[in-house]
Amino acid sequence: MPAADILPDALDALHATFGFTAFRGVQEEVVARVLAGQSTLAVMPTGAGKSLTYQLPAVMQQGTCVVVSPLIALMHDQLRSASANGIRAATLTSADTDRELTIDRFRDGDLDLLYVAPERASQPHFRELLSRARIALFAIDEAHCVSEWGHDFRPDYRLLRPLLDAFPDVPRLALTATADHHTRADILAQLGIPEDGLIVAGFDRPNIRYAIRPRENAMRQLKALLDENPGPGIVYAPTRARVEQLAETLSAGGRRVLPYHAGLSPEVRARNQAAFVASEDMVMVATVAFGMGIDKPDVRFVAHAGIPKSIEAYYQETGRAGRDGDPSVAVMFWGADDFARARMRLAEVEQHRQQSERQRLDALAGLVETAACRRAVLLRHFGEEPAPTCGNCDNCLEAPGVADATQLAQKLLSAVYRTGQSYGIGHLEKVLSGVADDRVLQRGHDQLSVFGIMTEDEKPLLRPVSRALQARGSLLPTEHGGLALGGDARAILKGEASVPIVVPPRSERKRRGGRDSGANPVGDPLFDALRTLRRDLAQEAGVPPYVIFHDSTLREMAAARPSSLAELGEIGGVGTRKLEAYGSAFLAAIRQF
């Protein structure tokens, strides 16, 4: 059926189900292909409404849409939201106690959506179950997991192809937010989707302000970030011990802060996650085990207390901020030791993947060390051609300087070499500065040609140069915590490679995050009353507040002040089911002002 014939019915269903009057971005193109029975790979940024592209066709078509999703928490989160919109949905997971009821509903044609994990979907008994009812669509969420090129490869995704091929007339919709050129091609091949089925939306998340800063005092820097951003937030830390430490210290500031990592019991993880999803101001300190299963739209900031695994991981993790489109912040605090540890871990990777992983780490170092627009570096990594500046990252808002530190880098590399490639930056700094302490004297390093050759002007730049050299791999960590030459170190010493470094602005302006630049009105009694009502209704229903209505819907209510159900139904995000369930209560609240 031509897209022009499909669109009117799709728009009617869109408004009735979700309360929206128009599609966003490439949603319309993806939905049109699905309704026409064409298999598709849609690469859409987080917050672009990927789930709508299969939920809407599921409501419009006969049969059940089978959704393959990697995490139980993510499935249950989407189940809550779908059910709130009147969509008949269920999950079939190891955590569900109503398995037989779900199977009966599926066989009776009483489900629009059935969520399953890839481990279950790849089993023969599940294929046999699907043969007993009508299947309208296979939706494969987080489809980058099928590719070895992807940053989150999962072997169970590779086993989905036989299931899909067993139902050749059922279209396939693969969805992901993070896939470079190689990963996209692999997804198409692994899931049997034709090349003309690829739809790539822009990767830009213009509502997220990116900032990357050297880690000087992580606790102080994170406390300042929390003070500036009163909404929900996520702080990623590299280890379980660091998660516990940060959570305990940050919670002393009065804000509710909870930890999340694989070392906690399943009950504690589930309790902390539920608290975060339901909260309007809580902070979760977590390892990267947290986040993929969270469909929370109102996260106002994401912070990294160390470097992520790759640019792809950074994009996905920071993308958990601002899914509702409101202003949000992504801040990374990094240190040279982050890159040192990451380069050491490369030896643990399978031989055939080491080169690609090294390239990912080099690309991340380029993002961290750039003096140019962060967003432009990110988007170019995913194959886009962005404008040279964005106006919403740290480097665009307050441009840093760039200094040619090649000569100082040569002095540092020479000191590393002449001291035997076994000392850390503290000892090397003393040698270059001409500080003859006991350790320097005992080892005879006061007799080296590099002793005291660093000028007073160069001393403040030594640590930034060391960070830059470790980030690019010119300096590598030794087994005992020293530094050794690596990468292009010899080229730098010979004058064949230069070392530009970023020099931060002298005085960093204190820019407020959520408090001053947030979208929600401050001091508006009607808006505050609507949020209170939403919170009460959510507690009564046992769902997070955003499942009732997003903040953007409440803002529109407060501005438009509808006086009837018909007028309220014209507000974005108020679909038929929610109008019936909550309309009278919100109208009553509005009439009080």
Image (cartoon, rainbow, N blue to C red):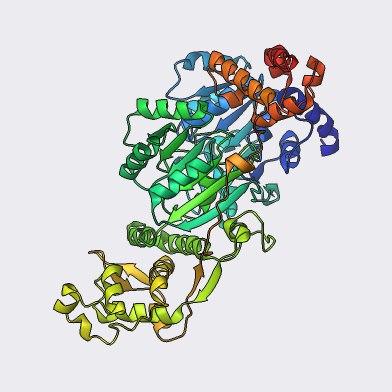
Q: Is residue 436 left or right of residue 98?
A: left
Residue 504: x %, y % from top left? 51, 64
Q: Is residue 147 left or right of residue 568?
A: left
For residue 189, above or below residue 109: below
Number of marks drawn: 0
Figure quadrant of the C terminus: top right
For residue 578, above or below residue 115: above
For the residue pair 357 and 571, the one nearer the viewer reads as: 571
What residue appears at the point 33 percent right and 39 percent down from the top-left corner?
A: 244
Figure quadrant of the N terminus: top right
For residue 330, above or below residue 11: below
- Corner quadrant of residue 446: bottom left
What residue appears at the point 50 percent right and 65 percent down from the top-left corner?
A: 369
For the residue pair 17 and 306, the one nearer the viewer reads as: 306
Residue 168: x %, y % from top left? 63, 36
Residue 325: x %, y % from top left? 65, 40
The answer, for residue 47, to whether it is visible in the render is yes
- Corner quadrant of residue 401: bottom right
For the residue pair 587 and 162, the one nearer the viewer reads as: 587
- Corner quadrant of residue 582: top right
The answer, for residue 157, to whether it is visible in the render is no
Q: Residue furthest left?
A: 442
Residue 148: x %, y % from top left? 48, 52
Q: Is residue 572 left or right of residue 505?
A: right
For residue 563, above or below residue 146: above
Q: Is residue 24 left or right of residue 481?
A: right
What residue appears at the point 28 percent right and 68 percent down from the top-left corner?
A: 426
For the residue pair 139 and 531, the one nearer the viewer reads as: 531
